[in-house]
Amino acid sequence: MDLSTNTIRDFLTNPIHTRWVAPLLLAGEALLCALIIWRVPYTEIDWETYMVQVRLFLDGERSYLKISGPTGPLVYPALHVYIYSILYTLTNAGTDILRAQIIFAALYLVTLALVFACYRRVGAPPWLLIPLVLSKRMHSIFLLRLFNDCWATLFLWAAIYLLQRRKFEGGGFVWGLGLGVKMTLLLAAPAVGVVLLQAVGRGDAVFTGLYIAAVHILMALPFFGQDQDTGLSYFSRSFDLSRQFLYKWTVNWRFVDEETFLSRPFAISLLVIHVSLLLLFFQTKWVRPSASSLVEFVRKYVGGMREVEERSIAKKITPTFATDVVLSGMVIGLLCARSLHYQFFAYLGWATPYLLWRPGGHPALVLMMWALQEYAWLVYPSTTVSSILVVSQLAIQAMFSLIAPPVDHISVPPTKAEELRS
């Protein structure tokens, strides 16, 4: 093998080179975002509805029962309202779509930079960064649709990055802020909770949870001002776990007939599968830093532990462990979701390459699976085949998360001093 081949192989596989590859890809993405905004027509889906809803809020309406728009009522938590109220002001009451797209392009690049940073901290090879910038669906969600899922995705990856940096309470808090944009991040709640418990101990984990709850209450206070029904309508609408979804928009369950899709037994079955998978991951993966089983884990954290044991457990919460747990928690939730719409790909698109690579997936396998998933999410409207692909790829990623080595099987990125010595 000649020198040039060795150089290319090293450039693509040595984690040290992510330091240079990531900025180059970001620069290319900035140009691509500008090109997409310039050349590809904007698609109106929910932006107008967001703007109508925040206009009602800014005009003084506080009852979620009375805040609605062209595509339906307001069903998102308070931070969504505040973010889009700012966007309303910055975009001339939502009419300056170009400015909105530029803001979302910046949001896309910031979020992608966080994703790159997270990949670097788990020692991902440079080639694994490439599919992160190739998703047509991700560009569409951020630049052409302006969905609130984009903001929730930012908070998700910021939380993962902070957990990797051992800023555990901060990571939990940022995840909680994301939950204030869209309740989809509830899917990661068990994962974030188990990371916090083992990283900071029962007392600090409970305090972080209470702090998150307090912040949510504070954000919701403006919607409590008129009467009791106003406050109740906020929680019943923004955190409605019983919401019915339209069959025509489902991406994942098109291969199921509409009657089954809308049935209560189908919903209960998905819930049972979700809980069962969570218990399986708790038992086999998520509690391993502190216990050999879920029963032992519960006994330790209910009964209490000595401080020296808590410190010993906390040392085992590595960047890879935190990333594994949060992303596997999200993919399990998406796999068992009552219905997925196209914008939900925002939570999955940047997680998939990592989840496929983590158990030692060969580049050809990772890229093939990634391409199949990308194809499935690009089919519109969804078909029986595309929805089978969506569900099967989610199942594969959950399985890969389950069989991934229980400890970091790859070297962490070298420090700058180590790079200079090499």
Image: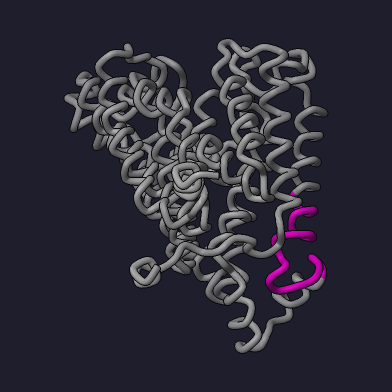
Which residue is rendered at x = 20% and y = 21% of the image? 96
Does the magenta stretch mainly form a helix, a strand or a loop?
helix
For the N terminus, the quadrant is top right
Percent position of residue 308, x then y:
62, 89
Can you see residue 231?
Answer: no
Magenta range = 278-295
Write down the quadrant of residue 103 in the picture. Answer: top left
Question: Total marks drawn?
Answer: 0
> Image quadrant of residue 39?
top left
**Does residue 341 appear left or right of residue 384 in this picture?**
left
Q: Is residue 112 left or right of residue 305?
A: left
At horizontal 58% and vertical 10% (from top left) the residue drawn is: 381
Q: Position of residue 38 (x, y in %)?
A: 25, 17
Residue 105 percent coordinates (x, y):
30, 32
Side of 175 relative to 196 (left or right): left
How far across and how far down the image is residue 155, in percent? 42, 48
Residue 284 located within the stretch drawn in magenta: yes
81 vs 305: above or below? above
x 76%, y 35%: residue = 270
Q: Is residue 283 magenta?
A: yes
Would you place residue 214 above or below residue 314 in this image? above
